[in-house]
Amino acid sequence: MKSDPRQHALNTLAEQLGQLSPGLPGGSAWSARRHQALQRLLAEGLPDKRNENWRYLDWAELDRRSLTAPAGLHGGLAHPPGTPGLEILPLGEALEREGERLAALLPLPGSESDTGFDLLAEASTGTGWWVRVAAGVEVGEPLQILHQRKPDAPSHLRVIIELGAGARLHLIERFAGGDGEVLSVQATSLFLADGSALQHTRLFECSGESALVDQLEASVERDARYRQALFMLGGRVLRSSQRLRLRGRGAEAELDGLFVVDGQRQADLYTVIDHEGPQTRSRERVHGVASGRGRAAFNGRILVGPAAAGSDSSQTSRNLLLSPTAEINARPQLEILTDEVKCSHGATTGSLDPDQLFYLLSRGIDPETARGILTYAFCEDVVGVVTDPAVRRRIEELVAGQLPDRDLIQELL
Amino acid sequence: MSNNGATILRIENLHAGIPGRKILKGLNLEVRAGEMHAIMGPNGSGKSTLASVLAGRPGYEITAGSVTYLGQDLLAMAPEERARQGVFLAFQYPVEIPGVNNVYLLKAAYNARRKHRGEPEVDAFEFLELVRGKMKLMGMNESFLSRGVNEGFSGGEKKRNEVLQMTVLEPTLALLDETDSGLDIDALKVVSQGVNSLRDPSRAIVMVTHYQRLLDHVQPDQVHVLADGRILRTGDRTLALELERRGYDWVQAAPGAA
Ligand SMILES: Nc1ncnc2c1ncn2[C@@H]1O[C@H](COP(=O)(O)OP(=O)(O)O)[C@@H](O)[C@H]1O
Ligand SMILES: [Mg+2]
């Protein structure tokens, strides 16, 4: 049973998309896909609290927001000028140029019961970026994309990245802006051909009122390597659902994540790492901090399929609760369908270490600063993986900005 | 014994413990400026409890008695306040704080103390000069500058680091909790050197120790024997030698001379 306001929001969206559709890019292949997705969305609806993988989200907050009138984004793009073998296009142009090929490449949202947001992103495909690195090309400098949402309208965004065999890229994406009346959705599809390597830094610094549902799927082929550093540092409600598929033999994924929620904010990270091929490796490490009445959830599933013999996975989740009203739900889940695999996982949730705290106090540091120092050090453990100095500084500012005595704290670390 | 300095620390009839357990049971001690005291006692006698209570570690209950530091009620002061007023504890088990830089923490501690005295803070360059000098004295290499607080330090390195902090901060009252245990003979010499360098007519040092071998390198004015939460005996260095010979049982069997 769907609540009336939701169905109403979907109906309004359908109407608007209907009006917009003649102007959307990609030719008949894409108008058909959008139409299909919309019909399914209207029939199946968005997931809700009763869905296991979505139960921790603040649905009251999401349901009061509008989904309508997808608008464009202000975007900034910084990339190494004229790198041969690196192509970057606004998604619309890419769909116009090779809509059929992209339609064949991108899988349709699956038939699971909670694909509503995938369908929503699919139905509004039009805005975003497409990047391709040709086989064998190593892009030396990081490619940086700033996704700046407008304050007055939702923007549904798609990003498609294709790495040819042996290609290498460091992609830095920053998600900013957004407002308090709307819910935005975005979907990212990553294709890593054999032996390629993508380093992916994703910084969510959305405005404090924004609500965003982020979806990402990566296909990692033989001996390819995907590394993501994920920072969920902004937004009133921020959900990220990710599926990393280790398809080929020897494929590898690493995910380092940090979420920090204060005030009334909420972060929800759901990851599935799917070991499909043999001898695939994954390492996942997620740190979370919640203060005030902040709420967060981390649900990390590791699936080791029947063909994934010799695979190795590790997952750790460490969480810091800084107030009695803050809440973090960490749920690691291992599903192993083959022998001869190595899996380790562990989750801890606690407050600051009293011995460390006392050590700092005994050196004359005041209690509030001492707590800030220890919290920052906890975050810095993950922030330390960021290699780009400017982006790292930005992340450190965002983390320290929520703490007292930020100058002193930053000097100490 | 040099009884000329002003009283820095006065402990009277101190009863303290953890919930459900009495550990200190009527402890008295007076420490004057310029003095060095050694408190010896068997394991579990309450030495660390005394040091913790003086530094303000949470979790201990004070059920009776008083502690006066420079004429003020020490027990009423927050731990950071005690530190800023010149109380320093070298921990028996210094905690590791990964990610927090060792030297910058020391600088923050140093400046917190200066600020409290109304002195201007020192800048990073000036401070590094100071620390480098002290590190040389402590036989520590430059890598200590860039490491996290006690992060991955060996037991001996942690103790040296505590003494380094002490020599930089120049406390009015230095409390050392078994800083000598777990050290090889060279490290013991270096640590003793650090302690000796701190001796000054305006300062006082209280060393808690389990072994008498530290006393081959430092010259305390008074040696106290702590057993079962009380100081059972007080004497000069010869008391330590006698303890070495006859063991703690001797003191416990024949109390009196306190
Ligand atoms: N926080 C604590 N929790 C439980 N027992 C404690 C605690 N602190 C001290 N004790 C107990 O009190 C006694 C005295 O301990 P301590 O002061 O550490 O002795 P010492 O340093 O002389 O070896 C010991 O029996 C010890 O086990
Ligand atoms: Mg002890």
Image: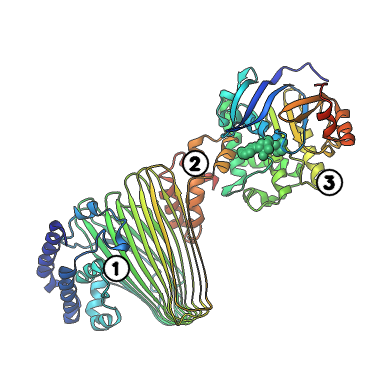
Determine whether, in the image, residue B246 is placed left or right of residue A39: right
Q: Is mark 2 within 8 Å of ligand 1?
A: no
Name the residue carrying label 2: A371
Q: Would you identify the image quadrant in which residue A205 lies?
A: bottom left
**Both on one chain, marks 2 and 1?**
yes
Which amino acid, mark 1? Ala
Separation (CA) of disc 2 from disc 1: 37 Å
- Same chain? Circles 3 and 2: no
Whole-percent x, y for residue A41 in the image = 18, 69
Residue at 71% in and 43% down: B159
Q: Which residue is mark 1?
A: A187
Q: Between marks 3 and 1, how big is the CA–CA gap?
A: 64 Å
- Answer few, some or many: residues within 10 Å of disc 2's Cα (few below 14, many 20 plus, some between 14 and 19): many
Local crowd size for mark 3, using a 10 Å CA cut-off: few (<14), some (14–19), many (≥20): few
Q: Identity of the amino acid at label 2? A: Arg
Q: Chain of mark 2?
A: A
Write down the residue under mark 3: B185
